Amino acid sequence: MTSGGIKYWNSGDIPMIGPDILGGILTSVSDVGLVMTESGTIVSVLLNRNFEDDGLFQNIEGRNLTDLLMLDSQDKFTKRLGAFVDGDDHVRPIEVNHKIPDNRTGLPIKYSFHRIGEGGIVLILGHDLRPVAEMQQQLVSAQLALERDYETQRDFETRFRVMMDSSADGVAMVSVQTGTIGDTNSKLSALIGSKREEMIGRSFADLFEQRAKSNLMDRLTTQALADGDGTIEVRGARGEMLTLRPTLFRSAGERILLCRIRSSTALNAETDRTAQMLRGVYDKGQDGVVFTNEDGAILSANEGFLNMIGAAHDLNLRGKPFMDFLQRGMVDFSVMSQNAARVGTLRSYATRIASDYGSPRDVEMSVTTLKAADATVFAFVVRETPQADGSHRSDDDSGLSSVVELVGSSTLRDIVAETTNVVEKMCIETAIELTGNNRVAAAEMLGLSRQSLYVKLRKFGLIAQSSD
């Protein structure tokens, strides 16, 4: 044992090693072995059979090793070799990059320096660092991917927190399995009177009165699984009534209840305010509003409609048929009600209304189908059409411009006849569509006899279309 703590073999412990055996030992413990002079000239090369050098170490005897290195490695290797030659036996191994054509990074190798006797001969043993470099690159790529995932997660957390805190309702994320609160928003803190940090991890049932605790989670889960958007009313721990609207979802294999919580008092106040605004529009609006049942009997009418027909009070209209005030009577009501019942609304329908004393007025109506308990109700909004309507003028102008384009290519008689046929066909098609292919109603709407309507249907080839 030496003073440095290194134990040497005793003389005679191992036999003399032959050159061929020594070469095999050197190549088994390293990827490349270079025997060279103290100036760096390569004398001999030993390669591990599993080392892929891409021909870099072929026929390099007699060349200086620095000529095979990249520029950033040449000075570094020369200094380290000089320190070893000057007698520093403890010089550290050095990592250098060999030049490879069409490769910017080169071949990284870690060399260690060894003396093999007198005569100025140096042995350097190299280890291929490409597996280490590939592993480092994989680690860097994994780190970058992890940082991107963290950034994406932080982005989603920020959006989630902003959405939660901007909600008008209190929101709580509750585990179905444990019944504990996973997350809340600031609105719930204001409703409950407890800080967000104090509620997280706490039992959700503890936020409410004692009687609601026993089966609250079961009630919420059942309501969330039921069809529709139902709510549950419970009394909070401070005595106020709260409305809970649960939604069930699964996250990371765990079922979560998203509970939107609102004060029933505030909810009722908001509903009352909305009802007041709608009532104001109904009472003071200039457009007529009429509610009828499925048979057309008037249920209620506002002041706007009473002014149009000159009626004194809606009590005088209740129960009367709405079609009595329409120009085409039952035909108009059937067209509007059937189309509204089929699609829910009818945006615009042009007709005329009149009372027993007033002159007829041109109006446009929109119809909406409503449900009042189990009964179907039609809401008619009636707007008087001005005599000089700019929109109608623009439509007429566009029609006239298309007719003017025919001047010069046809005679005046042909232009008038063709234009009349086009308009006539469009009106018949519209009437057939509005009446749901009811030819009797379409003929009455157009002011034609049934026989005249059939003649025009045959003329324009609409018989098959109206029969579909």
Image: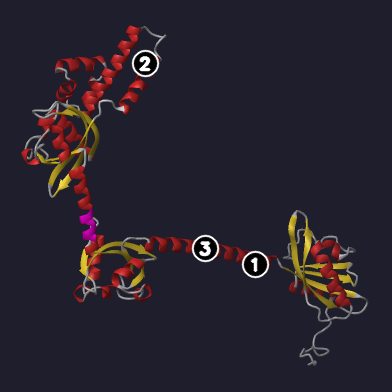
Judging by the rendered image, the residue that carries numbered circle 2 is: 403
Q: Is 189 situated above or below 435? A: below
* Between marks 2 and 1 in the image, the one whose residue lies nearer the viewer: 2
Q: Pointer 1 and pointer 3: residues touching (CB < 8 Å)?
A: no
**How far separated are the C-alphas under marks 2 and 1?**
78 Å
Residue 361, position as x, y percentages in the image: 18, 28
SS at circle 2: helix
SS at circle 3: helix
Span colored in magenta: 267-273
Judging by the rendered image, the residue that carries numbered circle 3 is: 151
**How far separated are the C-alphas under marks 2 and 3?**
64 Å
Mark earlier in primary sequence (1, 3): 1
Residue at 38% of width from left, 18% of height from top?
402
Q: Nearer the viewer, residue 271 or 253?
A: 271
Q: Residue type at mark 2?
A: Val
Q: Residue type at mark 1?
A: Gln
Mark earlier in primary sequence (2, 3): 3
